[in-house]
């Protein structure tokens, strides 16, 4: 019977270093996921403002940016812009948590002085 030689060469230092880096990255990712899961969620916190006005042949179009600083997504976001006796409304399908979305409304006059507000939303 022929005996086989067992070759147990020591592992290179670089291999151990890369294993340690991989373990640290994995542990960090798991820690972040657990920490985020334990944080209390805040409801949507929506604000709206006019960011741009464009003159067109049929009037003025205001670009409204709606920002959500909350931890939950808002769906069916209703926006109202009022300029004197004229008002315009728009609905956004959703505004993601910590994100933004844009809506467009039309006025006869320049709407830079229009009052813009979020009227309501629903849970997705």
Image (spheres, grey):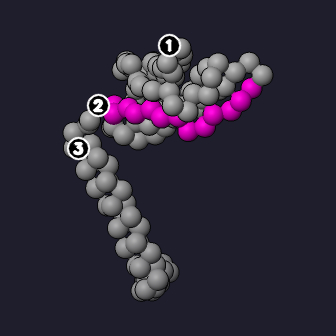
Q: Residue at x 64, y 18 (%)?
A: 108
Q: How many marks?
A: 3
Magenta range is 43-56
Q: Nearer the viewer, mark 3 or mark 1?
A: 1
Q: Which residue is mark 1?
A: 85
Q: Position of residue 111 (x, y in %)?
A: 57, 28
Q: Residue at x 27, y 42 (%)?
A: 37
Can the viewer see residue 89? no
Q: Relative to 20, is 111 above or below?
A: above
Q: Which residue is mark 2?
A: 43
Q: Nearer the viewer, residue 38 or 115?
A: 115
Q: Residue at x 48, y 35 (%)?
A: 49
Disc 2 element: loop
User: What is the spatial separation of the Cα atoms under label 1 and label 2, in whole angstroms?
Assistant: 33 Å
Q: Nearer the viewer, mark 3 or mark 2?
A: 2
Determine whether label 3 and label 1 are within 8 Å by CB. no
Q: Nearer the viewer, mark 1 or mark 2?
A: 1
Can the viewer see residue 92? yes
Q: Nearer the viewer, residue 68 or 58?
A: 58
User: What is the spatial separation of the Cα atoms under label 3 and label 1, in whole angstroms?
Assistant: 45 Å
Figure quadrant of the C terminus? top left
Disc 1 element: loop
Q: Residue at x 50, y 27 (%)?
A: 114
- In this rendering, position of residue 36 left or right of residue 64: left
Earlier residue among tags 1 and 2: 2
Q: Nearer the viewer, residue 8 or 74?
A: 74
Tell whether position 92 is magenta.
no
Q: Position of residue 58 (x, y in %)?
A: 74, 18
Earlier residue among tags 3 and 1: 3
Q: Which mark is residue 39?
A: 3
Determine whether label 1 and label 2 are within 8 Å by CB. no
């Amino acid at each position: 019977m022929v005996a086989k030689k067992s070759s147990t060469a020591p592992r290179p230092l670089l291999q151990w270093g890369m294993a340690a880096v991989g373990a640290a990255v994995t542990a960090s990712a798991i820690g972040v996921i657990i920490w985020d899961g334990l944080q209390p969620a805040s409801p949507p916190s929506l604000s709206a403002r006019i960011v741009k006005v464009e003159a067109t042949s049929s009037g003025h179009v205001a670009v409204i940016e709606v920002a959500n600083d909350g931890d939950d997504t808002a769906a069916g976001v209703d926006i109202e812009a009022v300029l004197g006796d004229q008002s315009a409304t728009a609905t956004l399908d959703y505004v993601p948590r910590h994100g933004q979305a844009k809506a467009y409304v039309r006025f006869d006059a320049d709407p830079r002085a229009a009052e813009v507000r979020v009227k309501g939303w629903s849970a997705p």
